[in-house]
Amino acid sequence: MNKKKIFILPFFVFLIIISGCSDSEIKSSSRDIFAMDTYMNIKAYGKNSEKAINESADEIKRLENLFSVTDSESDIYKINNSESAEVSSDTAEIISEALEICKSTDGSLDITIYPLVKLWGFTSGEYRIPDDKEIQNYLENVGYENINISGNCVSVPQNCELDLGAVAKGYTSDRIAEIFRENGIESGIINLGGNVCIYGSERKVGIKNPFSDDIIGTVEVSDKAVITSGSYERYFTGNDGKNYCHIINSETGYPVDNGLLSVTVTGKSGLYCDALSTALFVMGREKAVEYWKNSSQDFDMILIESNGKIYVTENISFENKSDSEIIKIEQEN
């Protein structure tokens, strides 16, 4: 098996400051953090910036300890290894919100996909292509419908395992934004391993080009998250010469291969954008466009296909930095 090395790139989205006043005139604090298996950077502008950054760093570590799938003291580990556990309010909340998105996307997001992620070797680095029988056996343990929440008690069937990787960083960015508000922060940048939240002043965020090491374009946002899921960062090449990405389709049990290379979602909620970036990637372009058209338009998206075409919803401010064809997605009247 040929193995593709996985590099975690801490700043694969580039931030271009375009605020109305010079940030150099405002007191600022920043912190680099390694947590949730990725490099993070948070920066705040305002007189309480140092306090906000310190509280944010503590919050990141606290939530990591709750949501980790491998830490034996975490809420998720306890659920996965005892089938039922009393968890923190944060864990109950994030699971409840994730389940709503699982339902609305008909399982394109499924937080019980972890057994299949392990089967393919994405947790250990021991990559393999399972046979159909193995996949079908593991699929029997997958299904967000099997999660039961009563108050802060979460229960799952035997061999069903949760993984909050598709929502944890988004939820965390929402909490940091709350800390910024509580401390009167004027503006800030929350970059959790590429999951970006722009707080306050309007800024441009660069979107990674799946075909090269530069950016393919920029989006202009304020008080919004910009979150990307893609197949080009984490994958392995099998003996059959085919690339297999880390995002698994819970219906088939196989890594997604539908022509999409990346999905970027922007919106007010980091958790919502984080979850949708994965769900829409699993859906593929046609179903993702249909989902957006049938939604309340509380998010926007950029879809990049392997043929080089870029699909952009009509409400997003996207500046193309490449020669790629841009196709506007418009809401039907």
Image (spheres, rainbow, N blue to C red):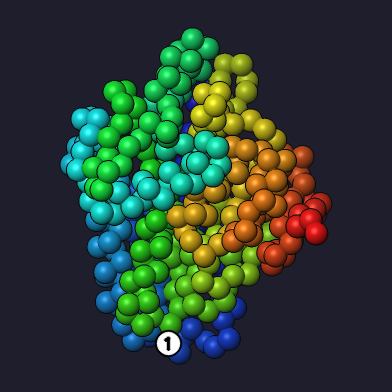
Visible residue check, residue 68 = no
Q: Is residue 79 left or right of residue 3?
A: left
- Residue drawn at the location 47% of the way across and 59% of the way down: 270
Q: What secondary structure is found at the residue carrying circle 1?
A: loop
> Quarter of the image holding residue 10?
bottom left
Viewer-proximal residue, 76 or 64?
76
Instruction: State the image coordinates of residue 13 (x, y, percent, origin top left).
Output: 55, 58
Viewer-proximal residue, 120 or 173?
173
User: Given the current orientation, which residue lies at the most extreme front position?
Assistant: 150
- Residue drawn at the location 37% of the way across and 58% of the way down: 172
Circle 1: is it few (<14), some (14-19), or many (20+) Cα within 10 Å? some
The residue identified by callout 1 is: 26
Instruction: State the image coordinates of residue 222 (x, y, percent, origin top left).
Output: 55, 73
Q: Is residue 28 above or below residue 157?
A: below
- Residue drawn at the location 62% of the way across and 23% of the way down: 242
Instruction: State the image coordinates of residue 192 (x, y, percent, origin top left).
Output: 42, 57
Q: Is residue 76 left or right of residue 241?
A: left
Viewer-proximal residue, 304 or 212?
304
Q: Amino acid at mark 1?
A: Ile
